[in-house]
Amino acid sequence: MNLKLRNFKRPTQPVEPGPRRGRLLFLAFVLAFGVVAILVRAFDLQVTRNEEWLERGRGQHETQVKLRARRGDILDRSGREMAVSVNVPSVYAVPREVTEPERTTELLVEVLGVEPEKILTRLKKKNEFAWIARQVTSAEADRVNQLKLPGVHITDEPRRFYPNRTIAGALIGFAGVDGTGLEGIERDYDRHLQGKEYTFGVMRDARGRELLTGGFLPEDQLAGSSVVTTIDLRIQQVAEASLARQVEEMGARAGFVVVMDPHNGDVLAMAQTPSFDPNLFKEARADEWRNQPVTDSLEPGSTIKPFLVAAALDAGKVQPETIFDGHGGAMKVGKKLVKDVHGVASMTTYDVVKFSSNVGAVQVGQRLGKELYGSYLQAYGFGEQTGIGLAGEQSGILRPASTWGMIHLATMSYGYGLSVTPLQMARALGVFATGGRLMRPRIVKAVQNVRGQAIEQFPPREVRRVISEKAAKQIGEALWMATQEGGTGGRAVVPGYRVGGKTGTAHKVDPLAGGYSKSKMRSSFVGMVPVDQPRLVMYVLIDEPSKAHYGGVVAAPVFRMIGEEVLPYLGVPATEPIVAKAKQGEESDVLAEAEQAEVVEQIAPRAQAWWLEAQAPDAPRTTMPDLRGATLGEALAQLRSVGIDPKIEGAGLVVGQRPLAGSRFEASESVTLSLALPGEPTRVAAIAPDANDSVLEADVPPPDAPTSVTP
Amino acid sequence: MRDFFFILGVVALCTGVLLNTVHRRNGYYETGYALGRARQTMASLQEEHKRLLVDRASLLDPGRLSPIARRNGYAVAAADQVVLIDLDVEPTTVAR
């Protein structure tokens, strides 16, 4: 056969005739038919029913993977973690796969400590899915895995951790189990912190191996952004510790501190006592969740006086050397009698601040006039939100000056009849520290992506000029005098630094009896340090102290305690000879000694008892030390020094131990330590927050303001 | 004979193209597997990283370190121990 395939010209020689040609033609026909059939079928599969078969193929090999982006972190001003998300195991069941619900429930209850009735009901429903326990510890998940229960599985879920526990708890707030911010910065910046949910296709082969063909978006386009706050964790901790100590010493109900950098409005610390651990937020009361320095307003009492005097100086209504009549310590305004604790014959403008004279303040107020005073109070930012960007911020109460009567002007001159938040007070004092400029307070510096690059910044912002530089300098001098001999704020002096500040003691409103309570007070101190070039402004408030109530005795020491630790930490050099402040120094030593004793007292009994027994040569049995809160290294060092090699479960800090602390055991017995990251659930029954247990406070009109107010 | 080689050449070319396609397809899947494994490794490393961050942060918690430091005799620097170095002056003249 001579076939020419390259052209279709008739062959030059005739094809061989006969039966062989017929067979060839038949074969060609069969082949051609087969090819056509294949083509028809291929057309049918590839074109006509293409979508249907593609769909079937995808169903067999492709799955959709849903990525829930990680929630962003909350960081302090130096990048230290305040809130971080980590995946933790959760236990779920596919009830229709569970063969023995009763036995499975029994084992799960033993390992996880869950409620048996609830679990058994879920397992018996034969649904496709049921949660058994969410966000359990790694050790618990391992134990569940070891049980190999049919139909019981483990999955990972992101959980929020707050590694510094109670520090800045109310400010940070918390996120719920589904990763949504519910309180504090977690809620206010939820939009930034939440990442995007992203779904992408993944092929899986017959062995279930993942075959990534479509690619996926880089993490920085998915993950939530991190929020960089202006808080300094170290300053926050010092503020909280100092406040808690004073609240306890004074038998007070609560306390607040706001520490700010006056020049840029950065809030360096915002503390409140009592506080709560956001890791265990369900165990705290709902009213403890509130960030009270922002959400609660109160009457400022005498801490308003420097603002009054500065306004009068700025308006030229008084001069530093202006002399006021002391009226022997009592002055009549309308039908009301305004009194001073220690009456004087006469006083200068500065003395009004130094001695916290109500009689003098009323006269300064009268010279200034209600319209002018009202406009200055507004300019200081009272009666308006600060714009810090935290939800629930109160604006306080400042009624229009046109509605004030004579008595209102008088009571407002010594801090009654208006209400302010602790944040507003600290911010307003910043006006004196910055030479008369009001700054907008800042709690968040920037929002950054996972690579640490800033994607949004919140620069410091000056709101307005309130008073002149000259007036600011003059009031700084008056505030400094108030902390010197004869002044009310002597206990606020930080050795080595010039402190300026003002004390305040205000009667609380009694909403049940009506009017002001005679026994319930608020003691406060507002100050700046160093007074000549202020680095810090602080507002301290102690609520309902029972052992003393003067602001200078109750609140001023907190200012000193914080200043003593924070100023050297910030590298602010001393400007005053410390030997000259022997009294404060001695007092500080006594406090330090007391603190040292307290620490020793807390640690010594358990440590000493343990070591004494452990090192006794003839002790056949020994006492188990309390290792809770220790790191693995610390715990191992203690146990191994007496020849015990414990079994370790989990990772993090020690949260549990067997045998229990204090129990006696032989060294040959096995010791188990359970470790967990701070805040990992520990199966302690949660206390339901009591929504009704909120504090009742009211802002009150001025006419009933006490006529005798202590400095 | 010439036609035979021509057909052989065409068949060889087709086979080559097909083999190349299969090879590339295999390479594509291999890369897919590698990417899948890399994604899982990346996720687990990120997870470990986060876990370590929480560990580090809780160990550096000032509320935890402060009492330990005090117990071990460390104290906050006294105010007069903080000195601003004037760079225009010889260090020896400002050191206290």
Image (tube, rainbow, N blue to C red):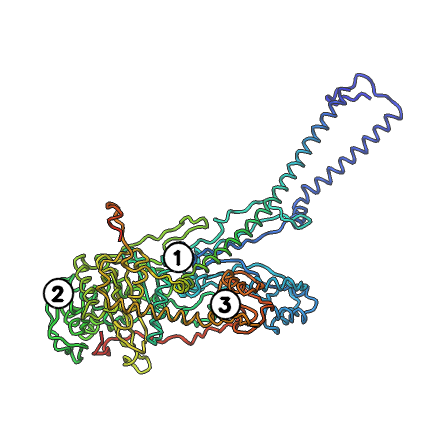
Q: For the residue labelled by badge 3, is the local secondary structure a helix, a strand or a loop?
A: loop
User: Distance from label 1 to label 2 (Cα)?
Assistant: 44 Å
**Residue at (28% x, 59% y) in the render:** B79
Distance in Å between CA atoms under marks 2 and 3 = 62 Å
Element class at badge 1: loop
Tell me whether circle 2 and circle 3 mark residues in contact (CB < 8 Å).
Answer: no
Question: Dot 1 falls on which chain?
Answer: A
Say which chain tag 2 marks: A
Residue kind at label 3, given as amino acid type: Arg
* Quarter of the rendering occupied by the N terminus of chain A: top right
Q: Which mark is residue A628?
A: 3
Which chain is indicated by disc 3? A
Residue for badge 2: A318
| Front residue of A16 and A531 | A531
Left or right: residue A625 versus residue A439 is right
Disc 1 marks a residue whose amino acid type is Asp
Asked whether residue A242 is in view, the answer is yes
Q: Label for residue A539?
A: none
> Circles 1 and 2: CB distance less than 8 Å?
no
Q: Are marks 1 and 2 on the same chain?
A: yes
Whichever of callouts 1 and 2 sits on the residue coming sooner in the sequence is 1
Residues at marks 1 and 3, CA–CA distance in whole angstroms: 27 Å
Of mark 1 and mark 3, the one earlier in the sequence is: 1
Image location (x, y in percent) of residue B29: 63, 42
Foreground tag (2 vs 3): 3
Three-letter amino acid code at disc 2?
Val
**Number of other residues with Cα within 10 Å of mark 1, as a class: few under 14, some 14 to 19, many 20 or more:** many
